[in-house]
Amino acid sequence: MKLNISSTIVITSILTFSIILAVIPTIISVTAIMYKGQMAEHQVENMTHSQHQSAESKLMLERGTVAMGFNQSKISHQFKPTPTGGEILITALNNSDTEMIKQIKNHISVIQKEFSSGNFTKPFYIHAQDVPGTKIMGEKNDFIKYSINQTINGSALILETKDKELINAIHQFMEFQRTEHKGH
């Protein structure tokens, strides 16, 4: 098939227009994100300390929903230090919500694998900062035993060690989580 110059120009114009149409939503999204970021910065300047904490808590729950794969308002988190480490208990608020309970059990299984390999990226992502204790827990992950306790409406991840430095790190981790989640 032989194309003349005007056909080539028309095809090139159509392709260019198609590319522009495909890129416009991305440009709009990036612009909206930048605008929201600027608005958020301006709003933070005008917030009281309590309002700022409330906004941060809401963002943490939103990141938690993304990282854990389920709605944070339908669960309860408990972080308990123990003499040999700690316990992370996640339960469904509705004992008959079998899908939520299944998602919790799956999440605890995933966290067990990640933490066992020294991977603490989810707590970092959820809290948008380094989480106390995770550096040492990651460096000495071979000295922590991670086991799972199934409950009727959720699951618990048990962290156990005999290493005093690790017990301290796990306690720091648990205390930070307990403070951040504030009964959630």
Image (cartoon, grey):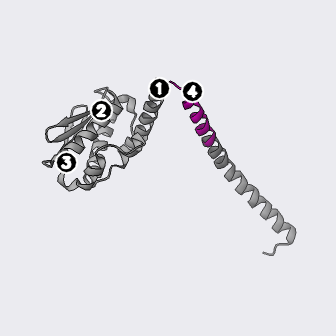
Q: Pointer 3: what residue?
A: 165
- Asked if disc 2 and disc 3 are in contact, CB closer than 8 Å, the reply is no
Specify the segment rendered in magenta. Answer: 34-50
- Asked if disc 1 and disc 3 are in contact, CB closer than 8 Å, the reply is no
Instruction: Tell me which secondary structure the magenta stretch mostly adopts.
Output: helix
Q: Pointer 4: what residue?
A: 46
Residue at figure coordinates x 25%, y 31% from the top left: 153
Q: Quadrant of the C terminus?
A: top left
Q: Is residue 40 on the magenta stretch?
A: yes
SS class, disc 3: helix
Rendered position, 112 above or below 142: above
Is 146 positioned to the left or the right of 183 in the image?
left
Q: Pointer 1: what residue?
A: 49
Residue at figure coordinates x 26%, y 51% from the top left: 136
The label number, if any, that marks residue 26 in the structure image = none
Q: Can I make out residue 91 in this image?
A: yes
Residue at figure coordinates x 47%, y 26% from the top left: 49
Q: Earlier in the sequence, mark 2 or mark 4?
A: 4
Quarter of the image holding residue 29? top right
Foreground: 81 or 17? 81
The label number, if any, that marks residue 178 in the structure image = 2
Quarter of the image holding residue 41? top right
